[in-house]
Image (cartoon, grey):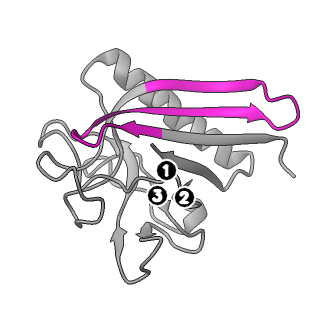
Amino acid sequence: MNQHITTAYYDRDVNTIEGLYTVQTVDRLTGQIIKKFSRLPARSGQRGHTHSSWERGKSPIPFTFNRFFYLWIGHPKGRGLPERDPKEIGRSYPISSDLTQKTRIHHPDNPNVFREFIELHFDQRLRKPGSIGCPVLVQDTDYQRGQALELFDYLDWLAKQGTEYIRQVVL
């Protein structure tokens, strides 16, 4: 069993696409935080579509609070996915509700309702703020871009250490 647990938290107000993204690794035995990326500015979904989590291509990533409903972030290579063209969305990390899926999130009460192609990546600010539902890291300043790149490097390092997935909680 791995001695460390890594969890990602995306905290978003229900009335906006704006949120904060935190990733932390904790020692399972001591509870001590080993690595933390705290409160990185992020967005999910498109303005005007924030009150439903299941509108494909527009609403934010589904909330996971008060349920035994987790999302999992993987590495593209670990899920058999090709790495994205940097001109498209750049580095990306697939998110799913089932470890057998690649980028699909199923509704916890209705398996026929799902979202697809949800991945953690940079906000494509040149197009327009927001995403089709992916949690996207804001890169409005060099500092924000640097923090996001450091997080992506850490996710790559975790994958090389044998961590296939990390749990994501959407608050």
**Image coords of residue 115 (percent x, y):** 34, 68
- Judged from this view, the residue extending furthest toward the front is 66
**Image coords of residue 45 (percent x, y):** 24, 50
Dots 1 and 3: beta carbons under 8 Å?
no
Query: Please, is residue 11 above or below residue 32 in the view?
Result: below
Spatial CA distance of label 1 from label 2 is: 6 Å
Mark 3 nearby-residue class (10 Å; few <14, some 14–19, many ≥20): many
Dots 1 and 2: beta carbons under 8 Å?
yes
Q: State the predominant SS element of the stretch in magenta.
A: strand
Q: Which residue is mark 1?
A: 65
Query: Which segment is the magenta one?
Result: 10-39
Instruction: Please name the amino acid that badge 3 sits on.
Output: Pro
Spatial CA distance of label 3 from label 2 is: 21 Å
**Image coords of residue 130 (percent x, y):** 21, 43
| Disc 2 secondary structure class | loop
Q: Which residue is mark 2?
A: 67
| Disc 3 secondary structure class | strand
Q: Can you tell which quarter of the image residue 144 is in?
A: top left
Seen in the image, is 77 located left or right of residue 121?
A: right
Spatial CA distance of label 1 from label 3 is: 20 Å
Mark 1 nearby-residue class (10 Å; few <14, some 14–19, many ≥20): few
Determine which of the numbered discs, if any, sits on residue 117 in the image: none
Q: Which residue is mark 3?
A: 94
Instruction: Please name the amino acid that badge 2 sits on.
Output: Arg
Residue 30 within the magenta-colored segment of the rendering: yes
Seen in the image, is 44 located left or right of residue 11?
A: left
